[in-house]
Image (cartoon, rainbow, N blue to C red):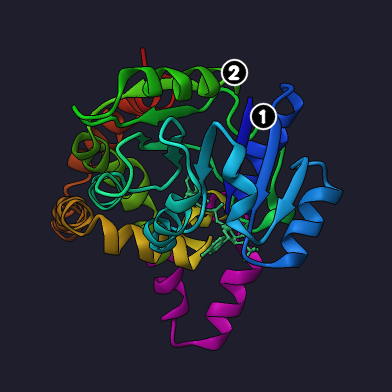
Amino acid sequence: MRIGIVGLGLIGGSLGLDLRSLGHEIFGVSRQPKTCEIALQRGVVDQASVDLLLLAKTEVIFVCTPLGAIQSTVEQLVPYLQPEVVLTDVGSVKAAIAQKILPFWGNFVPGHPMAGTAETGIEAAQSRLFAGKPYVLTPTDKTPPASVQVVADLVKSLSATLYQCSPAAHDRAVSLISHLPVMVSASLIATCLQEPDPETLLLAQQLASSGFRDTSRVGGGNPELGRMMAEYNQAEVLRSLHGYRQTLDRLIDSIETQNWSAIEQTLRQNQQARPQFLNPM
Ligand code: NAP
């Protein structure tokens, strides 16, 4: 297939590497000429340009720009597109994006690969980023089923695990397991930085090891992405954060009242439940 990718960063670049290795012809558009050069050098794309005109002859286009640029990207793309072109995006929030894009392009299949790293940009692109990871499509009742099938087949070819749900269901679920962790992990780092004693802070930095590396990873990643999650999924992120605050209050109460058995019981339940998030049926 002739596949277009707009936004040659971590996600767009990684898609290009995999789809190209599967034999598709990849046309990439990015904002900076340097990014286009690197994408060509790294074999992410067959052709690259800063001009959306390059995508005029593609059959499927993945919009991989930051959330805040998806709508303007699609508005600028539309004049170049034949009506049968299937557009899809990779944005981390789906209801707001679907609402913004559908008036411009009905043949749009909102999507979200549940894969990432703490790095950004074309240099961070890597092969098989999506393999074994969930990739969710969130068509609306107006999305043409044949277009959903086209994107679903491409997703499956990445060895990703395909899921399908409504944009609203996606945003609620993802606020719990992706957006809340970013906010909590960011707050963890911020709490450490609030330590007023410089010697304690330095010692904490020196002693930080694998536990801190794991728990701070998502909060120490792309600041623009975290801001966009909060901005575009505000209601669901707030709902998750309020739930988290209740959990924290219960924990504080248990510690203040020395209710050690309550803490142990909660931790035991969590230990049993965690695998259901990591290896679901
Ligand atoms: P990224 O590494 O920063 O890549 C985005 C790329 O888009 C940048 O390299 C930039 O290219 C380009 N760009 C920015 N504005 C543009 C514009 N107006 N027109 C054309 N290109 C533009 O970010 P990312 O992590 O790949 O995120 C991209 C999308 O994937 C976001 O919508 C995000 O919600 C979604 N997503 C991210 C993750 C994650 O964990 N990172 C996971 C799943 C989904 P230049 O270098 O040319 O400026």
Vertical arrangement, residue 67 with respect to residue 205, above or below: above
Q: Which residue: 46% across, 25% down?
A: 151
Residue highlighted by disc 2 = 157
How many neighbours does mark 2 have within 10 angstroms: few (below 14), some (14-19), or many (20 or more)?
some
- Alpha carbons under labels 2 and 1: distance apart: 8 Å
Residue at horizontal 36%, vertical 62%? 228
For the record, the magenta segment spans 187-212
Q: Is residue 259 left or right of residue 101?
A: left
Residue 117 position within the rendered picture, expressed as x and y whole percent measured from the top left:
59, 48
Q: Is residue 156 left or right of residue 254?
A: right
Q: Secondary structure at mark 1?
A: helix
Residues 216 and 261: in front is: 216
**Which of the marked residues, 2 or 1, is nearer the chain's N terminus?**
1
Front-lying residue, 218 or 152: 152
Which of the two residues, 116 or 146, is positioned nearer the viewer here? Answer: 146
Say which quadrant the C terminus sits in: top left
Quadrant of the image occupied by residue 89 = top left
Q: Going by the image, does 198 lie left or right of 16?
A: left
Label number found at residue 19: 1
In which of the image's four quarters is ligand 1 placed?
bottom right
Q: Residue 161's spot in the image, x, y percent?
A: 47, 20
Q: Is mark 2 within 8 Å of ligand 1?
A: no
Considering every residue shown, the one lying at the far top of the view is: 281
Q: Are marks 2 and 1 in contact (CB under 8 Å)?
A: yes
